[in-house]
Amino acid sequence: MASIIEPRVLKGFRDFLPPQEIARRSLIEKIEGSFRSYGFVPIDTPALEYAEILLGKGGGDTEKQIYRFKDKGDRDVALRFDLTVPFARFIAQYKQELGLPFRRYHIAKVWRGENTQRGRYREFTQCDVDIVGSESAAADFEILLVMRNTFKALGLEVSIHLNHRGLFNKFLTRIGAAEKSVEILRTVDKLAKIGEEETRRLLAEITGEDGAARILQFINCRGTYGEVLKTMTELSGGPSPESGRLEILRSYMADTGTGDSFVLDPAITRGLDYYTGIVYETFLNDDPSIGSVCSGGRYDNLAGLYSKDPVSGVGASIGLDRLAAALEDLGKPGERPSYTVLAVAAGGEEEAGRRQALAEQFRARGIPCEVLLETGGRGGGASADGKTDSKADGKALVRQFIQAEKKGIPWVLMPPQAPGGTLTLRDIGARQNREGLSLQDVIEIVGGGAKGQMRRPYDLP
């Protein structure tokens, strides 16, 4: 007999059992609902692309982390490492069909062969939202607003730290370090991970001790939005279009009363080369030490890799897995481990059709309903007066209650044995029966008094 293969998954990859996947999908539904409320529409792209498409301007550690191989046609291919680069290729191919400006969202898995840690995996899900075809500050601000309000929809308060890569580059030009900007930006991007002293040491290797000191002075500016902007403007050589863009954004924050959610932070640089304008990272107010759970920025030249006509873009990406890990660390309550609100107790084989017909009446009213499966006995009927039938297999019924509890189903319905009889509803949490109920009674109890019309998880209030 052949040996049995040990069931296992690759390091950095995971399976999700129903309770975990339901919680993840609930997050996705709320995020998607927020994106849609701003007029963003969904797209999808292949998981596998030509390697040159993905590596055109990834830069840095991207090439080391990418899953790249030759396929059966000897083509050089790779798994996407984010959703932004494939989107740039997508826009270059279809911009005439889409029309610009174009708002999209894309929620899908990506792959990176990086070291695994809490909230970081080699296969993970990103939730991206972008506006392309507009260079305006209004587009920048709309993305910031979407980020803020998406986290509010999740019941989370956040601080969004933003900066302008162009203003940082002007500062580097002023101190004579412009030609080393890529190395400097990537080093500063690691500040939160490696600390100030290690950052100083690495910067000194690139620019010398004096250059490192001046860069640290710039990125350590603190104060109100206006105070930090004034200092950054002075250190970068005076007013410029870049500092003007940050000032416009401040006025939009004042107009919408959202200024408390935003922090001007010159240490935010983002490590990828394609960012050219505003950049930002998002931190949970309850625990900023968890790190950024959403980041992004403006990438005016990215689509130019695949087209003679560059297309401006600005977007953000929520790391779903990091967010889920953060919520778990914070002890935030999760969703019920089941979509099912109501279960109909099983009967004998001859009763299965009638029980499904009963369940269909609840499903038609938007109440998720499952018919339990049980072998042996009559499985939980009730007499015409609504009381449990003495002939029913009590042990089978108890097994079904236990089954429902394990699944997280809050209610179990026991149909009558005689036509026209009343219904008995079992409250699994309270371990109590409600007897003598009509169909409408049950609909109102399990549907929260909303006449059986339940709001879907992704419908916004």
Image: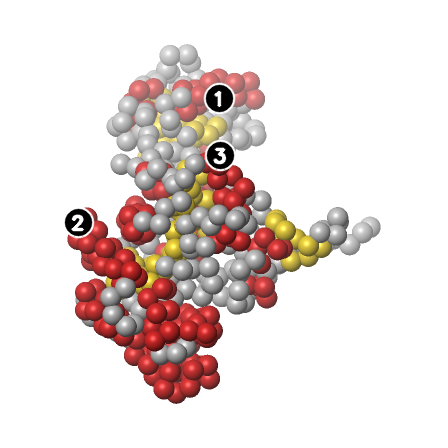
Q: Which mark is residue 356?
A: 1
Q: Residue 390: x and y, percent?
A: 43, 24
Amino acid carrying label 2: it is Asp
Tell me what residue is drawn at x 35 percent, y 37 percent: 39
Q: Residue furthest bottom?
A: 209
Disc 2 + disc 1, Cβ < 8 Å: no
Give the foreground label among 2 and 1: 2
Residue situated in front as seen by the camera: 425 or 136:
136
Q: Secondary structure at mark 2?
A: helix
Q: Residue 98: x and y, percent?
A: 46, 36
Q: CA distance from mark 1 to mark 3?
A: 46 Å
Q: Residue 30: x and y, percent?
A: 36, 43
- Name above or below for residue 106 compared with residue 224: above
Tell me what residue is drawn at x 71 percent, y 51 percent: 75
Give the foreground label among 1 and 3: 3
Q: Earlier in the sequence, mark 1 or mark 3?
A: 3
Q: Secondary structure at mark 3?
A: helix
Q: Earlier in the sequence, mark 2 or mark 1?
A: 2
Q: Residues within 10 Å of mark 3 (few under 14, many from 20)?
A: few
Q: Which residue is mark 3?
A: 97
Q: Earlier in the sequence, mark 2 or mark 3?
A: 3
Q: CA distance from mark 2 to mark 3?
A: 35 Å
Residue situated in front as seen by the camera: 242 or 83:
242
Q: Residue furthest front?
A: 308
Tell me what residue is drawn at x 24 percent, y 66 percent: 239
Is residue 303 visible to us here? no
- Name above or below for residue 16 compared with residue 234: above
Q: Secondary structure at mark 1?
A: helix
Disc 2 + disc 3, Cβ < 8 Å: no
Amino acid carrying label 1: it is Gln
Q: Which residue is mark 2?
A: 255
Give the foreground label among 2 and 3: 3
